[in-house]
Image (cartoon, helix red, strand yellow):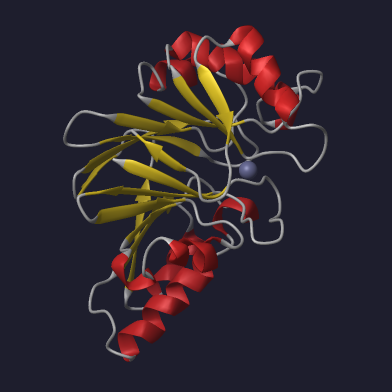
Amino acid sequence: MKCTVVGMWGGFPKKNEPTSGYLVEKDGFAILLDCGSGVAAHVQNYIDLNALHHVFVSHYHYDHSSDLGTFLFSRMINTQLKRVDKQLNIYGPADNDVKSRVDKVKQNNFHSYNKDSTFQVGPFSIKFHKNAHSVETYAMRITDDAGHSLVYTADSSYRKSLARFAEDADVLITECSLYEEEDGEKMGHMNARDVGMLAEKAGVEKVILSHLPHYGNLEELAETFRKVGAGEAVLAEAGMEIEV
Ligand code: ZN
């Protein structure tokens, strides 16, 4: 499978660089992980909105879900224009408000999930891990029909269970919101040292540092990672393609 980083900033987008969004594709089939600010506009650099029918949302913080409404409207209008005749499926943690927003537009379907859920969508199997964050949030593990796997942490403090969930993944896209002197446990996020430990415990060789902070020297995140984590780590960039 191939994963394209649509956006990777924490909190808010930069000019032409969205917050969280990752397009995962195989054999002409696509799913989107998270739809933060700017993702609906920028994902169109890689795929037509009418060819994308599955959006998995990790949690309802704005930097992961604020473009949800944009996706709902695009499917509603493009259905009226007869440019698409398939429903858009939104998968997220149970939430009555989100469910009613999605269900209000008949071209869209809401599917809630929890830590025990598994979805089989096209060539992908998707499983979830409940994270340590300020709202209900899930990491996702996507395995394709060839057995290759991608883990996306979304937002979380470090947990051993998250390392077990990511075990032996071919690629780990992990949040790396903080520098090593900042306390990830308190913030519901991971610092670069936590991320190194996560990758090391999970035995992952290829790591993408994402959900990046808007301050400091980002290269220091990768340097700290290398002191702790065994594998190779690169900073996520908008438009980056990752072979999994
Ligand atoms: Zn969050």
The spot of residue 98 in percent (x, y) is: 49, 62
- Along the line of sight, which residue is nearer the eye, 33 or 171? 171
Q: Residue drawn 33% across and 90% down?
A: 80
Quadrant of the image where one finds ligand 1: top right
Task: Say left or right for 194 vs 35.
Answer: right
Task: Say left or right for 224 vs 153.
Answer: right
The spot of residue 193 in percent (x, y) is: 67, 15
Task: Say left or right for 217 vs 207.
Answer: right
Q: How many marks?
A: 0
Eyeballing the image, is 62 above or below 230? Answer: below
Eyeballing the image, is 66 above or below 208? Answer: below
- Residue with the most extreme bottom position: 81
Q: Residue drawn 69% across and 33% down?
A: 177
Eyeballing the image, is 125 above or below 70? Answer: above
Which picture quadrant has residue 62? bottom right
Q: Residue drawn 42% across and 30% down?
A: 129
- Along the line of sight, which residue is nearer the eye, 217 or 80? 217
Eyeballing the image, is 135 above or below 36? Answer: above
Which picture quadrant has residue 179? top right
The spot of residue 114 in percent (x, y) is: 38, 40
- Along the line of sight, which residue is nearer the eye, 174 or 92? 174
The spot of residue 176 in percent (x, y) is: 64, 30
- Along the line of sight, which residue is nearer the eye, 38 or 120? 38
Residue 125 in view of the camera? yes
